[in-house]
Image: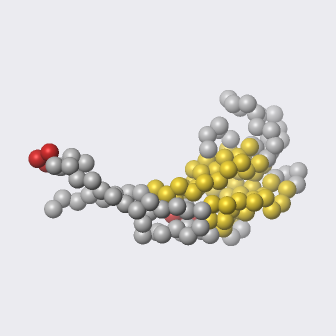
Amino acid sequence: KLLPGGENKAAKTEAVEVAAVFEEINRDADCAVYRVDLGDVPADTVDDVLLHMDFTGDHADVYLDGMLIADWYTTGQPWKMALKRHNYPKTLEVRVYPVKNPTYFEIPEPVGMTLNAVDAKPRYAIRLTEK
């Protein structure tokens, strides 16, 4: 940020890594179920953590303690889900569903039901104040 008088100030923050590991725990004709384990989040260091998920299928749901908290339909884009509003859970359940009925897609129709990748990305916010 350029301050009055042309003085530049740089803000620094400590980079944080948050682990995200997933494994398939169940599969039948209706859906594939995955457990996603998340590492510790230093909530005082980050503004939020976005869980990036890439899946093949019609749609996917995320459950926390048995309650549906988010869903996403295939768009061709990775799914980004904020974790702060859920108090940075340690474990989530992701269910991926296949395409069952003929559906129009603007991308190649997804075949199967697989969670391909999960990554946790910290988001930072730096608040500047005038003296």
The colour scheme used here is secondary structure
Image height of 124 relative to 58, above or below: below
Q: Is residue 60 visible?
A: yes
Examine the image and state in which quarter residue 112 appears: top right
Residue 70: percent from left, percent from top? 63, 56
Query: Relative to 91, is 126 on the left or the right?
Result: left
Query: Relative to 54, is 13 on the left or the right?
Result: left
Going by the picture, which residue comes out furthest to the left?
Answer: 5
Instruction: Kindly identify the residue that appears in the image at 80 percent across and 38 percent down.
Output: 111
Quadrant holding the C terminus: bottom left
Residue 64: percent from left, percent from top? 66, 66
Instruction: Kindly identify the residue that appears in the image at 63 percent across and 60 percent down.
Output: 20
Q: Is residue 68 visible?
A: no
Image height of 57 relative to 120, above or below: above
Query: Relative to 19, is 15 on the left or the right?
Result: left
Instruction: Kindly identify the residue that appears in the image at 16 percent across and 49 percent down.
Output: 7
Q: How many marks?
A: 0
Instruction: Kindly identify the residue that appears in the image at 68 percent across and 41 percent down.
Output: 74
Residue 124: percent from left, percent from top? 42, 57
Residue 130: percent from left, percent from top? 18, 59
Examine the image and state in which quarter residue 25 appears: bottom right
Examine the image and state in which quarter residue 58 appears: top right
